[in-house]
Image (cartoon, helix red, strand yellow):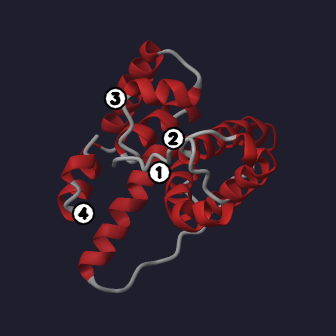
């Protein structure tokens, strides 16, 4: 996915940016948290932290806000590990066989993603669902490219071990071959 880059001289208003980017940010957060309510809370918390600094954001705001979402996620995971709360919102899909099978595969994929350590999960989501390069991921997370590679390698190995058929079947049903881990 190509990112829309705003020229430095053309600042974007927060309301305009969030109207255009909120769904994308929530999707990333959903992939990180595995829970739509937590994803929305995560994005709103990150947005509330970005708004006071909005005038200092130069260039495209999406990478800045996405990085805020990721850092908030990693921070929340650290805080949650002390409390160990795990909200869930698994709502059954419609009764058709195809959508039921797809929902089960999606749930298996979310479970496999949720089992990854937070940094591995962030790297996998950014690489395969946000289509960022290793260098872009390293910049967003503030880690080296080598660390991105090792986290991605370990994360994919864990996903393949946890759900080998789920990944292949989910990608085959969804038709999303270019996002394939």
Sort mark 4 into few (<14), some (14-19) or many (20+) by Cα contacts within 10 Å: few
Q: Which residue is mark 3?
A: 157
Q: Is residue 16 left or right of residue 178?
A: right
Q: Residue at x 37, y 69 (%)?
A: 103
Q: Are marks 4 and 1 in contact (CB under 8 Å)?
A: no
> Which residue in the rendered view is the most extreme toward the bottom?
95
Q: CA distance from mark 2 to mark 4?
A: 22 Å
Q: Nearer the viewer, residue 44 or 88?
A: 44
Q: Describe the element under mark 4 as helix, strand or loop.
A: helix
Say which label, 4 or 3, has the lower sequence index: 3
Residue under label 4:
174
Kindly report the distance in space between the C-alpha atoms of the residues bearing marks 4 and 3.
Answer: 21 Å
Circle 1 SS class: helix
| Of residues 118 and 133, the one drawn nearer to the viewer in this rendering | 133
**Nearest to viewer (mark 4 / mark 1):** 4
Of the two numbered discs 1 and 3 on the same chain, state the one appearing first in sequence: 1
Mark 3–mark 2 Cα distance, whole angstroms, equals 12 Å
Q: Residue at x 28, y 85 (%)?
A: 96
**Is 11 rendered above or below residue 175?**
above
Left or right, residue 75 beside residue 176: right
Residue neighbourhood size for the residue with mark 1, other residues' Cα within 10 Å, grouped as few (<14), some (14–19), many (≥20): some
Residue 1 in the image: state x and y as whole percent. 33, 49
């Amino acid at each position: 996915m190509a990112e829309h880059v705003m020229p430095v001289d053309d600042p974007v208003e927060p309301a305009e940016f969030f109207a255009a980017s909120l769904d994308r940010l929530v999707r990333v957060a959903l992939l990180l948290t595995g829970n739509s309510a937590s994803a929305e809370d995560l994005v709103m918390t990150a947005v509330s932290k970005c708004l006071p600094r909005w005038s200092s954001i130069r260039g495209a705001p999406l990478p800045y806000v996405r990085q805020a979402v990721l850092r908030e996620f990693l921070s929340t995971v650290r805080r949650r590990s002390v409390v160990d709360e795990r909200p869930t919102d698994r709502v059954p899909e419609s009764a058709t066989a195809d959508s039921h099978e797809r929902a089960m595969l999606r749930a298996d994929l979310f479970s496999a993603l949720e089992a990854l350590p937070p940094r591995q999960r962030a790297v996998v989501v950014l690489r395969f669902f946000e289509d960022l390069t290793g260098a872009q991921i390293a910049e967003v997370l503030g880690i080296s490219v080598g660390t991105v590679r090792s986290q991605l390698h370990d994360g994919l190995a864990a996903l393949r071990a946890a759900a080998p058929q789920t990944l292949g079947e989910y990608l085959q049903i969804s038709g999303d071959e270019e996002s394939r881990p």
